[in-house]
Amino acid sequence: MSSVSIRRRETSFQVRLSSACKLAEIPRYSPHDLRHRYASLKLREGVPVTDLAAQLGHSKKSMTLDTYSHVMIDE
């Protein structure tokens, strides 16, 4: 698959996501926002950091901890 078709697919997803947010009358979310929210909720639910790191594709759990440690501190 070419980089052009990948970008087109990403753009198409972003347009659909933006439309869905507007239809639901909620703030516009980006794929990054959704990923961050998912990870934050999973940590609050008590999912082990090693499991979450694997789900997010992080090669090391330290990357997950560096990015989402504020979730653990806020509790």
Image (cartoon, helix red, strand yellow):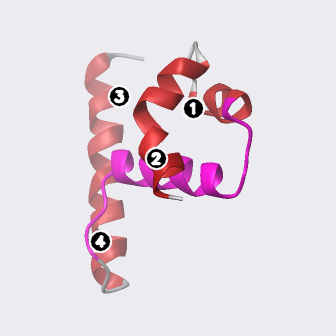
> Which quadrant would residue 11 be assigned to in this image?
top left
**Res 56 label:** 1
Q: Residue at x 30, y 18 (%)?
A: 3
Which numbered mark, 3 or 1, is in the foreground of this view? 1
Mark sitting earlier along the chain (1/4)? 4
26 part of magenta stretch: no
**Res 43 label:** none
Q: Are marks 1 and 2 in contact (CB under 8 Å)?
A: yes
**Residue extent of the magenta highlight:** 27-49
56 is higher (above) or lower (below) than 20: above
SS for callout 2: helix
> Which quadrant would residue 45 be assigned to in this image?
bottom right
Report the residue marked by disc 4: 19
Mark sitting earlier along the chain (4/3)? 3
Q: CA distance from mark 3 to mark 1?
A: 20 Å
Mark sitting earlier along the chain (2/4)? 4
Q: Residue at x 72, y 51 (%)?
A: 46
* Image side of residue 46 versus residue 56, left or right: right
